[in-house]
Amino acid sequence: MNTNFKWKKIGQIFNPAGQFDWVSTHGMLPVVDHIKDDLFRIYFSGRDTDNISKTGFVEIDIKKPLDILHLSSSPILDIGELGSFDDNGVSPTCMVNHENKKYFYFMGWNKGSKVRAAEVSGLALSLDNGATFSRYSRAPIIDRTDKEPYTILVISCIIIENGIWRMWYDSADYWINEELPRYNIKYAESTDGIHWTREGVVSVDYKSDDETRVSRASIIKEDNIYKMWYCYAMGTGGYKMGYGESKDGIKFQRLDHKVGIELSESGWDSEMICYPNVFQHKKNTYMLYSGNGYGREGFGIAILNKHEHHDN
């Protein structure tokens, strides 16, 4: 495949401006869920006035994605109990619809360490089509092991193929200092979406010694090729968007030059673009992504310009 991608930015969907208590600032980690027809729900992480991350959603018509139909007035998932892995914040990372259940994977924020933040992954389930979510467990579903002993373990993307749940997740190799972890994207498998076999298999590796973070895999499979968008950062700098391809979905070749989406000249996504969530609907491919300040200025949407047809 020799084509480079070209994403056309449609614009900013959500600008956090204190609309409700849970979303005083930030629109981080947009996660799409198709409701019906052209209606989509986008879960995301806002922050309250104490800078605590909480998860709510907006609903949009994909034909007019910048017109928000509904913004949840309260979090769909609030913080966990005091002392638990998610007592200092909850952010969405991945949604899987399977056998009339919604498997809602989220990241719990925690402060109980010398490092800036511990981030490990939990699971909440909805049995009522997204009206409510309840935690599967008060403990994380992926947590530290001897092979992966550091507190960046964040599920990004899950695809079920032939009964196997395939997961791509952020996993820290070490902390450079108390403020800066070094992590890339690893791969694991499960038969139920809950119990995972993790061997620390690297899926997307660093491309240089200067690179500190490779994060937030989002994958579509086309023409027997796994196509992944992610974000990456050098040193203490902000994220840029990257792209890679794989034949087996395990080891990805980095082709960042093909990514097809860059910073804007000005505005909400002119300093940073990050946290891609790529999805397909009616022959179109879309990307949700966060902007400046890791989503401090909200999130927006882009559409892939394809050669074989013209988008409306």
Image: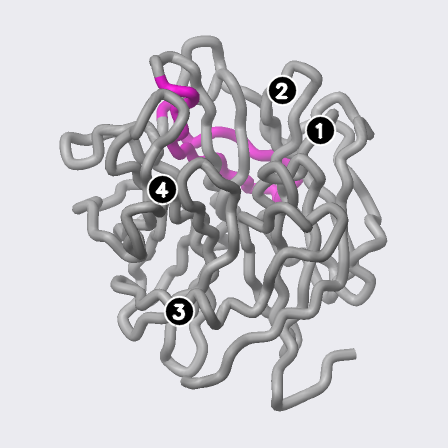
Among the 4 quarters of the image, the one containing residue 152? top left
Amino acid beneath label 4: Thr
> In the rendered structure, are the residues bearing label 2 and label 1 in contact, judged by CB atoms less than 8 Å apart?
yes
4 and 2 marks in contact (CB < 8 Å) = no
Foreground: 95 or 298? 298
User: Residue 124 magenta-drawn?
Assistant: yes
Location of residue 109 with respect to 234 vertically, above or below: above
Q: Please tell me whether residue 106 is drawn above or below residue 244 in the rendered image.
A: above
Report the mark closest to the observer, 3 or 1.
3
Instruction: Please give the label number shown on residue 268.
Output: none
- 4 or 1: tag closer to the N-terminus: 1
Query: 129 and 233: which one is in front?
Result: 233
Give the residues in magenta: 115-139
Q: Residue placed farthest to the top in the image?
A: 82
Q: Residue at x 55, y 40 (%)?
A: 126
**Which residue is denoted by mark 4 in the rendering?**
212
The residue mark sitting in front, 4 or 2, is: 4
Question: Which residue is label 1 attached to?
Answer: 25
Q: Indicate the quadrant where residue 25 lies.
A: top right
Q: Which mark is residue 51?
A: 2
Query: Residue under circle 3?
Result: 255
Given the image, on which type of amino acid does mark 3 rest? Leu
